[in-house]
Image (cartoon, rainbow, N blue to C red):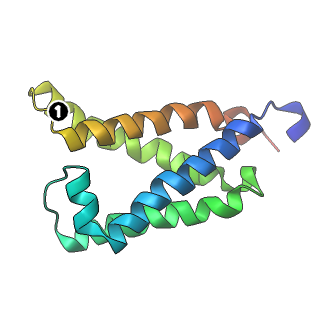
Amino acid sequence: MEANVPIRWGWLKGMYIYTILGAGGFGLGVLLFPGTILSALHFPAQDPVTLGLYGSVALASGLAAIPALRSPLKFVPLLLLQLVYKPIWLAVFAIPLFLKGQFPLYVVFISAVFISYIIGNLIAIPFSYLFSKK
């Protein structure tokens, strides 16, 4: 079936590498050095439990992307998860702030990173393969 469906292998692996470095690196940094990461990125003070939860999920995404480099199609659900939750966050949190004329630097930063993941995942995910009848 794979031979009949175009799959952008380079994009798939690239998005997994981006997830390893971006999400995994950020998650590890948040868990090990929360104060340094928050102040460096001008984030407001966070509840340590919420921050730890997000750091853990981000690190888990990065770690899950490591075996995806060997079997890219088996781990496409990781990219789909990103493709679903990032636009939800933008729609529910960032866009309403921007419409109010509020542009906190950390929200602009997160929005730019999330948009880069969304675009990359839209290019990388082989939707025709996922929705084909096997």
Relative image position of residue 54 (x, y in whole percent): 34, 63
Residue in the image at 74% along x and 34% along y:
8
State which quarter of the image contains the C terminus. top right
Locate residue 121: give its quadrant: top right
Relative image position of residue 10 (x, y in whole percent): 73, 38
Instruction: Name the element at disc 1.
Output: helix
Residue in the image at 38% along x and 65% along y:
29
In this rendering, position of residue 67 left or right of residue 23: right
Locate residue 100: give its quadrant: top left
Q: How many marks?
A: 1
Residue in the image at 57% along x and 32% along y:
122
In this rendering, position of residue 16 left or right of residue 60: right
- Inspect this view and state whether residue 132 appears: no
Task: Please give the residue where the numbered disc 1 appears in the rendered image.
Answer: 96
- Looking at the image, which is closer to me, 127 or 62? 62
- Inspect this view and state whether residue 83 appears: yes
